[in-house]
Amino acid sequence: MKPKTYEEFEATLKQSTPPKEWSEPLKSLWFDAKDDWEASHDIAQEFHSQMGSWIHAYLHRKEGDEWNAGYWYRQAGKPFPEYSLEEELKVLVEANL
């Protein structure tokens, strides 16, 4: 079942895998929240959409690659965030609920 709030999303982080019925963007964010950058990135780079570009941008920002992140934010039509990575994760999760 898809979470309805960020708090419900956080509660699923105790599981070993994300729920199968979740969207690919939500699964990507789940892996990131579990500190599995590689799994999150592998999923994010496979969906070619504005949301995929935004998640891809966030992941490269988290990695510290601002140049690459900037490219993906432009692809997503989003400005480079002026808030924390933690806040951006929450914004991204809520955008996918």
Image (cartoon, rainbow, N blue to C red):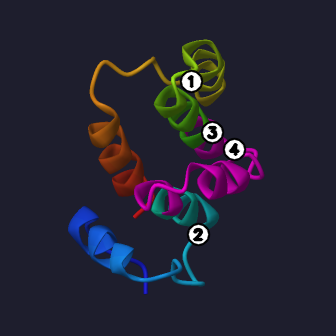
Q: Is residue 75 magenta?
A: no
**How packed is label 3: few (under 14 Cα within 10 Å), some, or many (20 or more)?**
some
**What is the CA distance from the residue labelled 4 to the residue labelled 1?**
12 Å
Above or below, 55 against 94 in this view is: above
Q: Earlier in the sequence, mark 2 or mark 4?
A: 2
Task: Estimate the x, y position of residue 9 in percent, counting from the top left.
Answer: 33, 70
Task: Estimate the x, y position of residue 67 in percent, counting from the top left.
Answer: 62, 12
Residue tagged 3 = 50
Front one among 2 and 36: 36
Dominant secondary structure of the residues highlighted in magenta in the image: helix
**What is the CA distance from the residue labelled 2 to the residue labelled 4?**
13 Å
Q: Please state which amino acid type lies under the numbered disc 2.
A: Ser
Give the side of residue 44 with respect to residue 16, left or right: right
Q: Earlier in the sequence, mark 2 or mark 3?
A: 2
Frontmost of labels 3 and 1 is 1
**How packed is label 1: few (under 14 Cα within 10 Å), some, or many (20 or more)?**
many
Asked if disc 2 and disc 3 are in contact, CB closer than 8 Å, the reply is: no
Q: Quadrant of the N terminus?
A: bottom left
**Residue span colored magenta:** 31-54
Which label number is shown at residue 73?
1
Which label number is shown at residue 49?
4
